[in-house]
Amino acid sequence: MRELLQTLGLQATNPGAATGGTEGWLDTRGEELVSVSPIDGRPIAAVRMATADDYEAVMTMARTGFERWRMIPAPQRGKIIGEIGCALLQRKESLARLITMESGKIIEEGRGEIQEMIDVADFALGLSRQLYGLTMPSERPHHRMYEQWHPLGIVGVISSFNFPAAVWSWNAFIAAVCGDAILWKPSSKTPLTAIAVQRILDPILDRHDLRGVFNLVIGSGREVGERMTADRRLPLISATGSCDMGRRIGQQVAARLGRSLLELGGNNAIIVGADADLDLALEAAVFSAIGTAGQRCTSARRLIVHHSRKEIFLSRLKDVYSRITIGHPLDGSVTMGPLIDATAVTAMMDALDRARRNGGRILYGGKKRTIQGLENGFYVEPAIVEAPRDLPVMMEETFAPIVYVVEYDRLADALALNNAASEGLSSALITDSLRAAEEFLSARGTDCGIANVNGGTIGAEIGGAFGGEKDTGGGRESGSDAWKAYMRRQTVTINWGPALRKAQGIRFDVGARPDHTAR
């Protein structure tokens, strides 16, 4: 572990605030935050959290960085983001191992997270030449109308532990090519990953004299998070986390008429049709339910299975679950690592207890696990619960590997169950029916922001805009035209004629130009 930390520029105690570049790290004096590995419950390293003065110092430099960065042509900004992508590629394995040690996700998922960052950098590089506006015909003679997009300012990014690096890149790389500076508050559960990412950026920022463009502040929600949401110097707050957290942030940012981009919880369902390929359905269900130990906002929480396939599907699902390997996530043969901490374990056990007391039947798993040599880690068995349609706890998001199985008769019933959740993030239908697929994707089908046919609920590609509806917050990140969230739109009208001509045919003659008739 010590060698890994040194490779990534980390040490026993690390500063928790930086304005980018090797000279941009502040000598922070805040309280100590210890990063504990969920794998074995042991401390990895400590972070000295930022104080209010540290926050102000970083904000001052971020403003200076933004003033310069916004005037650099977007294609040049894109090339710099491309350099960051190349640097991440060089450190991919080391950074993936740190993510695994700090968050508990299996190493294959850690590698996938860094690859996602590399891919987003590649996407941002191409996007830097495609920040298009529109031209519109004017109703007035000798007038031209068009829209253009300008950088928004300093974008605040609040990220979660389950994707301690990738989701930051969705925001940071796209916002950066748009000309914005970034202020990042990572999860207090995974601060070392954020510091390692910032260390990778430092030489590139130094080489281009770009101190203040990418900024990092580690601290509590009270000391840093609330300052960010109240800070008018941050016109946009992009936050990933629970629905409760999102409501608080949304209200605080709205109170100052700022913008918020919210990626919140999900209670996602996979519908297994009467004609489903069961091999495909099983693979989609298992990966979606136990990937990242069920700690993704897109994790499958509910399996809505046609009554004619339910018994055979459950039998095969239990068989697959019995072959899941639980253990040290750096072991390539392991398919599920630990939960993030003891609180997550307790929440899972409480949810299962509520399910039992309200008519749910636990068909598999749901117990705490002790792994030899890792006795202080936070391991559990993934759980399969056969649930009545009205089971209350099933309609709540528990960030753990619990999947509830309910049956349906008609596709309309399955869609109603899918859409009954308060959240509206990801959804999937396994079917060989073209009509069923099109119904699922129609305006009266799934109400989620992400819809998949013959796939799972997790594993979205970066090219599409990621996000959901209802209590999921309505935000969109990464692909498509999500870049518009990080810019301000300006409608431009140019009068190249000799007269001031008014829209809507309004006459307002003040006699200034008697030789012309104003419209």
Image (spheres, rainbow, N blue to C red):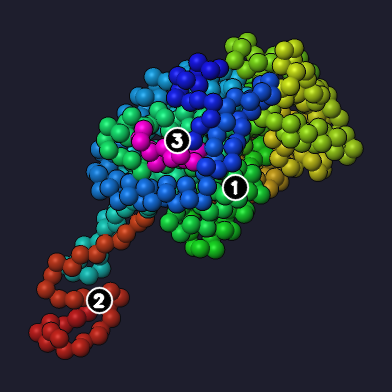
Report if residue 27 lies within the magenta region: yes
Which residue lies under the disc numbered 2? Answer: 502
Can you see residue 233?
Answer: yes
Q: Looking at the image, is mark 2 or mark 1 earlier in the sequence? A: 1
| Point 60% across, 47% down: residue | 221
Q: Nearer the viewer, residue 22 or 486?
A: 22
267 sits left or right of 110 in the view: right
Which residue lies under the disc numbered 1? Answer: 221
Q: Which mark is residue 169?
A: 3
In three-dimensional space, the C-alpha distance between marks 1 and 3, rounded to whole angstroms, equals: 21 Å
Q: Nearer the viewer, residue 252 or 373?
A: 373
Q: Secondary structure at mark 1?
A: helix
Looking at the rendered structure, the kind of residue marked 2 is Lys
Dominant secondary-structure state across the stretch colored magenta = loop
Pointer 1: residues within 10 angstroms few (<14), some, or many (20+)? some
**Number of the front mark, 1 or 3:** 1
- Residue 342 sits in quarter: top right
Residue 460 on image: x %, y %: 52, 32
| Point 20% across, 88% down: residue | 510
**Number of the front mark, 2 or 1:** 1
Pointer 2: residues within 10 angstroms few (<14), some, or many (20+)? few
Report if residue 414 lies within the magenta region: no
In three-dimensional space, the C-alpha distance between marks 2 and 3, rounded to whole angstroms, equals: 45 Å
Q: Secondary structure at mark 3?
A: helix
Residue 381 on image: x %, y %: 76, 22
| Point 57% across, 31% down: residue | 46
Write the start and end of the magenta stretch as one range.
Answer: 16-28
In three-dimensional space, the C-alpha distance between marks 2 and 1, rounded to whole angstroms, equals: 51 Å
Looking at the rendered structure, the kind of residue marked 1 is Gly
